[in-house]
Amino acid sequence: MIRLAAARPGDLKPLLPGEPEAALAAIRAAAARLSPEHAALFATPRRDDATGGWVWEAPGARAVAYADLDAANRARLVAEVGRLLSDLRREAERERAEGGGPLAALWPLPAEIPSFGALFAVDGRPVLAPWGFVGASAPGPLGLLARFDDGRAWGAPPRRPWGVWAATVAALAAVALLAGLLVPLVIWRLIAPPEPACIVDPRQVDVLARLTEAEARGRDLATERARLIAEIGRRRLDCPLPQPPPEPPPQRQPDPPPPETPQQRTELPEPPPPRPAPPPEPPRAEAPRPPPGPPPGTQPCDEETRSGGAGVTRTRHYLGDRRGRVILDYDTARVPDRIEVYRRGQLIESTPGMVSGRGRLVFDHQPGGDNTVEVVVIGPYPGTIWRYRLGCPE
């Protein structure tokens, strides 16, 4: 089994009644009437004993996330998901028409996902993980996969129309009797001049084909640009943060000159009366150094809300020398993004992949070094907006 996704308690909001295991048994029982691909579309959920959350797994050897596919493979993946969900939706409509069933009672909630990060290609077949859940801050079902449904409704198989068949046989008998009259009409139809046909200009077809290709190239370039932005952001994470220069040592005050001796005064011709030497100044106590403040280029915690758009945004926050729990509240709206938190170059907390909507990250602050953390927001999709607020240690 391959572990595809995991969620902690409070990250996602369930939409299905009861436990997901019972819903999966009902879905697979109905999907087995269609094909094994329909039954394998939904990953197997189980409780995580360590965190109390959910883990989704699927059998296979290799899994690739939706965000790691190119534009052509993403289009094929969502098209296959739409085909399988359309068949399951028609099966639910059939159960409702025949008096109800387990799939009819659940649909369309099993087809809900929190973001496109729930799509995976496992050994070339589509798998949903998680399914039947939305983000914790979502007001209700999002319908992200509804636009890939083919829209064809289930139709009851036609009954045998015995009356129509009898009328057809009678009509054929009458036609056979009148065959002598119909043969001349058929011959005249065969030798009649053909009707004018509408012919499309090939140049217009060629122009339309070039426009379609240009539009496809534009979509591929936008996808490649988002991928490069995310890759540059990941590579920048490997660069160490510059350390502040060391403070210069305090300068020592020069010692006062020693007083003149009586022998030196007698050697001088007619010396003026000696002036009394000033008393030596008491040693100055070194002023205590102020506590270290935020390093240059950092932002204090719990003061402002950071917001931005597409690309990779890196921000250093100063948390001070107080040990405690730190809470980061975020809102990535409808377009999914990924948020990561680093301490001295090490990843200490992140969202479960690309997420949309509101959420929270919690981690413990251990004072040391420059007492800063770095928050990295990766928004690979154009048009994304996000914001977050990083609190101080509690």
Image (cartoon, rainbow, N blue to C red):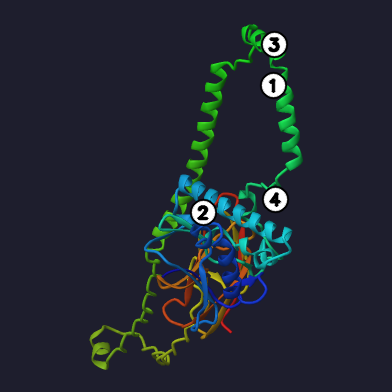
Q: Are marks 1 and 2 in contact (CB under 8 Å)?
A: no
Q: Is residue 1 above or below residue 111?
A: below
Please provide percent x and percent y for residue 359: 61, 70
Q: Earlier in the sequence, mark 1 or mark 2?
A: 1
Query: What residue is shown with label 4?
Result: 156
The residue type indicated by label 1 comes to Ala
Numbered-mark total: 4
Mark 1–mark 4 CB contact (< 8 Å): no
Name the residue beneath numbered marker 2.
380
- Circle 3 is placed at which residue position? 185
CA separation in Å, label 4 and label 2: 45 Å
**Residue at figure coordinates x 60%, y 62% from the top left:** 113
Question: Which mark sits nearer the N-terminus, 3 or 1?
Answer: 1
Expressed as whole percent of the image width and height from the top left, the position of residue 155 reads 69, 49
Q: Which corner quadrant holds the N terminus?
A: bottom left
Distance (Cα) linking label 1 and label 4? 35 Å
